[in-house]
Structures are given as structure tokens and as C-alpha cells.
Image (cartoon, rainbow, N blue to C red):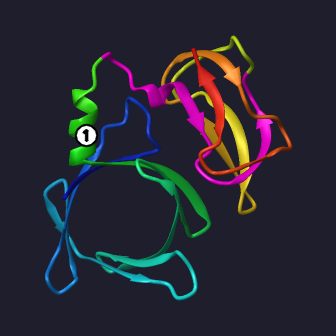
Amino acid sequence: MRYYVTLDPSPETKPVEVDVTELPSGELQVRVQGELVDVDRVPLPGSASLSVRIDGHVVDLTTEGAPPDVGIVTNGHRSYVRVVSERQRAAEATKKGGGRAGDKIVKSPMPGRVVKVLVEKGDAVTTGQPLLIIEAMKMENELRAKTPGTIAEVHATPGTAVEANAKLVTFA
């Protein structure tokens, strides 16, 4: 299956093509931008994390959220990636009307506590502009705008707990 992976997603960032094939032995054959990469993964006992070996480098990896927008925690560092399968990409391309509806709502990628809200109703924001900060697993995470627009509603309040996929900000 081909996946399009965008690190720290923004409209300017070009996705990386990753082809993953599970062999009959259970091993993975992975190609990144057409280049074969040696990859192996092992679930870590008692957790939802994986130990992943990529070209001889071992990394413990924990994911948060659900595709296409996923949070990745490794070595105490959190990043966000967008992982879209070839099928999902084709389905998105067939939708009519320009921008995706999902771009108008910013949702929490994980359960946490709202630390700070950086925008108000009526504010004009640019792509990549910080919208709010959520604390999860003792780390502060800055959520940014994926598209430019105007804030129609702010659903989050500093100090409140939010669940994963909770609606935080709506664009007009």
C-alpha cells in the first residue's frame, strides 16, 4: 500500500511517498521515495508502543490520535504527521468544492488540558499560526492552523480537560 506522509503538516509541505508491503513471512518491505529501507517493528510488552528499527537505528515509538492526523512521540519529542493512504487520497480528490470540510474544524489530537488559547472569535489567521496549547503526558503541544481563515468560534477554555477529537476551534 502506498502512503503519503507529511511531517509537521502544512499546505507548503510536500508529502513523502512510502510504499509498505507485508511479506508472507510477516516482515515489511518499505520503500521511501522509491528507495528500499530496512525496517523491522516489534510491539513493546504492556504498552501501545512499538520498537522500530530503521536502517540499523532503533527508536521506541508511540502514536496518538487516528489517521490521517497522528501525533508521534519518540525519545521524549512529539511531532505531528499526516498519513494518507493512496485510497484516501483518491477519495479526497473526488470530493467537490475545493477545501475539505475537515480544514474548518481544529480538533484535539489527544486527550489533555487546554493551557492557553491564542486566538479569539473574529481573528484572521494564517497557515501555521499557533491557535492554542494543550498539555498531554506532561508535554505542551502547540496546535497550528492548517489553512488561512477567520475564527468563527473558539470551543476551548484554558484549564479545561479535553478528550481526543474534541472540537477546539471552528473556522468561518
Residue 52 sits in which quadrant? bottom left
Asked whether residue 145 is drawn in magenta, I would say no
Q: Residue at x 58, y 33 (%)?
A: 106
Identified at 37% across, 36% down, the residue is 13
The answer to whether 113 appears left or right of 62 in the picture is right
Q: Which residue is rendered at x = 62% and y = 53% of the image?
A: 110
Residue 112 included in the magenta stretch of the image: yes
Q: Which residue is mark 1?
A: 89
Task: Locate residue 31, reporting x and y percent.
Answer: 18, 63
Coordinates of residue 168 in the picture (x, y in percent): 67, 34
Magenta residues (range): 97-119
Q: Specify few, some or many for label 1: CA neighbours under 10 Å numbering under 14, 14-19, or 20 or more.
A: few
Q: Quadrant of the N terminus?
A: bottom left
Give the image location of residue 62, x and y in percent: 52, 68
Q: Is residue 59 left or right of residue 172?
A: left
Percent coordinates x, y for residue 7 in the rendering: 41, 47
Residue 130, quarter of the rendered image = top right
